[in-house]
Amino acid sequence: MLFSLLGRQWRPRLLDRSAWAVVAWVLTMADLLPITWLLSGCDLLELSPNETRTPVAYRDLTRKNLEALQRRANPLAGDTLRFVFIGDSQRFYKEAEAFTQSVNQLQGVSFVAVAGDISDFGLVREMRWVHERLRRLKVPYLTVIGNHDVVANGREAYQQVYGPLNYSFEYGHTRFVFVDTNGREYGFKGRVPDVAWVRQALANPGPGISRQVVMSHVPPNDADFDPHLVSPYVEALQRAPRLAFGLNGHRHDFGVTAPFGPALPFINSYAFEKRRYLVLTLWGPQGFQIDSVSY
């Protein structure tokens, strides 16, 4: 008689009754207890490439990075703020390592903004691999969800690893609003982006806020943006007090455009594969400077 226990076959010798009781207990417990209990003290066992569970160290990264950012004093004087802007890390892990080394040499930078497509196939393991590189940054990094992050179980994976799909925060006299605009992945059903949420997030900047910035992955003039929501979304941005500009990724290359008029510029990021990133310096309600850095 052959037994299979956790993938290994063995043939028992003659056992007494008490020994058989032990074997029966082990088989029963293996059936009943979660595998994570059996692997106590180890990393979680990945049962599927679409697994969305992840160890505690790789959860709620947005909250953790925001808390780290709020503990940091703005290194620049007055209402001037400087941060790094890049997008689409996907599978470019070597480039992510070089990017981290380059950013760590900069002065006066408060944080890094990544404009989506952290992963290529919406897998937890991809998001973890990117975080393994970016956690070595000397400043916090913050992300928005991209269309590649939504595929398969990616939406749930992103929420596990990073957190909310839409969120806002204030730092350096600036309100940042990060929003999911990946309409195609939701079937163009008129729900993404959440225009009502965007309106509310931008509605009432306090007296200490010099400007507002919106970041998303898919630009509103892109074919992957829900066509039913282009007009209401753009109108929400145009009506927002002290909106400096919009930030986007998705197109893998740098560009500054104003498809809806000069009062609403959009800045598109380089992808990691380009081995270039932008350093944005902001001052006043609408003043900004863009510097491109190669690495």
Image (spheres, rainbow, N blue to C red):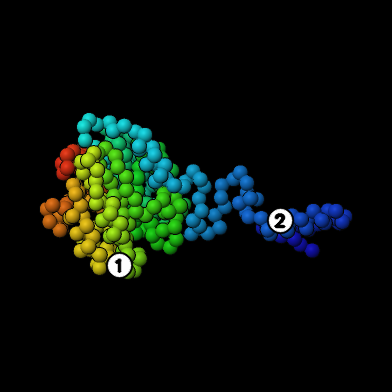
Looking at the rendered image, the disc whose residue lies closer to the viewer, 1 or 2, is 1
- Residue 123 placement (x, y as % from top left): 44, 56
x 50%, y 50%: residue: 54
- The kind of residue tagged 2 is Met
- Residue 237 placement (x, y as % from top left): 21, 55
x 30%, y 57%: residue: 197
In the picture, the quarter occupied by the N terminus is bottom right
- Residue 264 placement (x, y as % from top left): 16, 53
- Residue 184 placement (x, y as % from top left): 32, 65
| Secondary structure type for disc 1 | loop
Identify residue for label 2: 29
Q: Earlier in the sequence, mark 1 or mark 2?
A: 2
Whole-number angstrom distance, CA of label 1 to CA of label 2: 49 Å
Out of 213 and 256, give the one closest to the viewer.
213
Identify residue for label 1: 190
Q: Is residue 9 visible?
A: no
Is 95 positioned to the left or the right of 42 in the image?
left
